[in-house]
């Protein structure tokens, strides 16, 4: 049988890794796919041929639209990233009857509804395993392995750069900017590093996971997003004293009122496996009603781990080339006509526990006043510690953990506490998840 012909858009970190895996593991891949898979056409403006296996066998254009238009190409692999021209390229490939594999989480999170509708219409597949958690086959697990379950909630460390930064801050007391530079040099970080540190990348990925889990359209604009750039070393240390680790989590949960969709720094009890996921590694905890909790762990970024997921998609698409489009695994796990209109809850309606750090005047009655406001708001304190004032200082940090409460109630209480004359500066609030 003729080999399947792949058109590769991008020969950077992930594109280069994809070519290398396809060339190095060609025999093993053909044994799995039932036929050979070759990259016959690629698009890149700049690339280093010494890093690319078999590049001499590949026609390279500097215009990606030439690949998309090439009638010999069966599968277009989009590894350029970003919104545009990735969206136009993918839509054009679909229009030309080509299957698409992409690692582009931003594209799927924002334009996935449009892209999947177009693919459905044309009877082609758009595969996106590499878009979430790099090399971890989490899309496959959610869409197929857990298909028997009502998914109840998902909590994931889904940005490798953020996890690398938090781990280095905790273990080595390193400077935030210095660690970010290292992550960029290692090829983990997004082209715009604010996507990693402000939680946007994790929000893209969580949006995709929520749709697969609950059968809802992609709604990136409804995701509550808070990054790690305001985490201070003292909060990492206080969390540790309470027996917690601070991780940047994406959490999505189905409740009776709607779906929670939120990305933020989170205190997790240190005894949880996921609290011990360090460095660039990702982990996704999925709770299904039948299976209970399941945990998926692996490299969330980097050239070969991401290529592993891209190539697995290429193999999957190759296997389905001759199947009836109506009988393929649906893009968002549920049949397109079965997607449900469940509201995404505003963060004010979400219930979590909290870590609070206040800066207070060191004088009688301050703790009582704070506790009084929390008590009035129905917020129960689980633990509280007042630290020694630093030499010559009259202000002290007051750190506490609360029981679960709606965010809206907590916001009101925080406003009232910040208005106290004895409280100086804003209150630091980090959400707490016990994940039990
Ligand atoms: N910038 C992303 C991360 C790359 O750090 O996880 C993988 O999506």
Image (tube, rainbow, N blue to C red):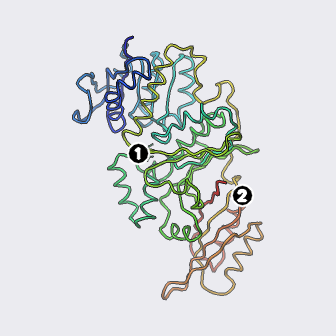
Q: Is residue 371 left or right of residue 174?
A: right
- Say if disc 1 is inside 8 Å of ligand 1: yes
Circle number at residue 190 = 1
In this rendered view, identify the residue nearer to me: 346 or 57: 57
> In which quadrant of the rendered image does the N terminus lie?
top left
In this rendered view, identify the residue nearer to me: 314 or 82: 314
Question: Residue 23: image x %, image y %?
Answer: 31, 27
Relative to 286, say whether 73 is above or below: above
State the residue position of label 2.
406
* Secondary structure state at the residue bearing disc 1: loop
**The image quarter in which residue 315 lies:** top left
Q: Is residue 46 left or right of residue 207?
A: left
**The image quarter in which residue 20 lies:** top left
Question: Residue 336: image x %, image y %?
Answer: 64, 25
Question: Residue 387: image x %, image y %?
Answer: 57, 80
What count of labels does the image hold? 2
Residue in view at x 56 percent, y 67 percent: 239
Relative to 102, say whether 296 is above or below: below
Residue in view at x 69 percent, y 84 percent: 365
* Secondary structure state at the residue bearing disc 2: strand
């Amino acid at each position: 049988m003729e080999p399947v012909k792949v058109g590769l858009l991008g020969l950077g970190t992930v594109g280069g890794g994809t070519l290398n895996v396809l060339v190095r593991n060609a025999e093993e891949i053909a044994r799995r796919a039932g036929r050979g898979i070759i990259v016959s056409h690629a698009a890149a403006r700049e690339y280093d041929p010494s890093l690319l296996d078999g590049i001499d066998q590949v026609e390279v254009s500097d215009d990606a639209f030439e690949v998309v238009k090439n009638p010999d190409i069966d599968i277009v692999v989009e590894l350029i990233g970003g919104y545009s021209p990735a969206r136009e390229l993918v839509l054009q490939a679909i229009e030309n009857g080509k299957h698409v594999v992409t690692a582009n989480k931003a594209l799927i999170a924002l334009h996935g509804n449009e892209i999947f509708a177009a693919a459905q219409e044309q009877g082609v597949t758009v595969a996106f395993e590499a878009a979430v958690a790099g090399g971890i086959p989490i899309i496959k697990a959610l869409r197929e392995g857990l298909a028997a379950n009502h998914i109840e909630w998902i909590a994931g460390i889904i940005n490798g750069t953020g996890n690398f930064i938090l781990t280095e801050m905790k273990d080595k007391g390193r400077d935030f900017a210095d660690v970010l530079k290292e992550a960029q040099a290692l090829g983990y970080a997004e082209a715009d590093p604010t996507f990693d540190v402000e939680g946007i990348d994790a929000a893209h990925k969580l949006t995709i996971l929520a749709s697969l889990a609950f059968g809802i359209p992609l709604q990136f604009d409804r995701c509550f997003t808070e990054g790690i750039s305001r985490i201070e070393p003292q909060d990492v240390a206080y969390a540790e004293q309470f027996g917690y680790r601070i991780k940047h989590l994406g959490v999505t949960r189905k409740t009776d009122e709607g779906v929670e969709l939120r990305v933020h720094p989170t205190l997790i009890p240190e005894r949880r496996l996921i609290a011990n996921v360090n460095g660039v590694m990702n982990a996704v905890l999925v709770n299904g009603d039948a299976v209970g909790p399941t945990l998926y762990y692996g490299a969330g970024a980097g050239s070969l781990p991401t290529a592993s997921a891209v190539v697995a998609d290429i193999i999957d698409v190759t296997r389905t080339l001759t199947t009836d489009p109506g009988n393929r695994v649906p893009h968002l796990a549920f049949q397109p006509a079965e997607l449900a209109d469940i509201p995404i809850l505003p963060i004010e309606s979400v219930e979590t526990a909290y870590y609070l750090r206040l800066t207070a005047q060191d004088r009688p009655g301050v703790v009582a006043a704070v506790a009084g406001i929390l008590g009035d708001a129905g917020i129960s304190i689980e633990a509280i510690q007042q630290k020694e004032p630093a030499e010559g200082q009259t202000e002290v940090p007051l750190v506490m953990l609360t029981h679960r409460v709606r965010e809206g109630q907590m916001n009101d209480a925080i406003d009232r506490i910040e208005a106290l004359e004895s409280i100086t500066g804003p209150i630091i609030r980090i959400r707490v998840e016990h994940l039990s």
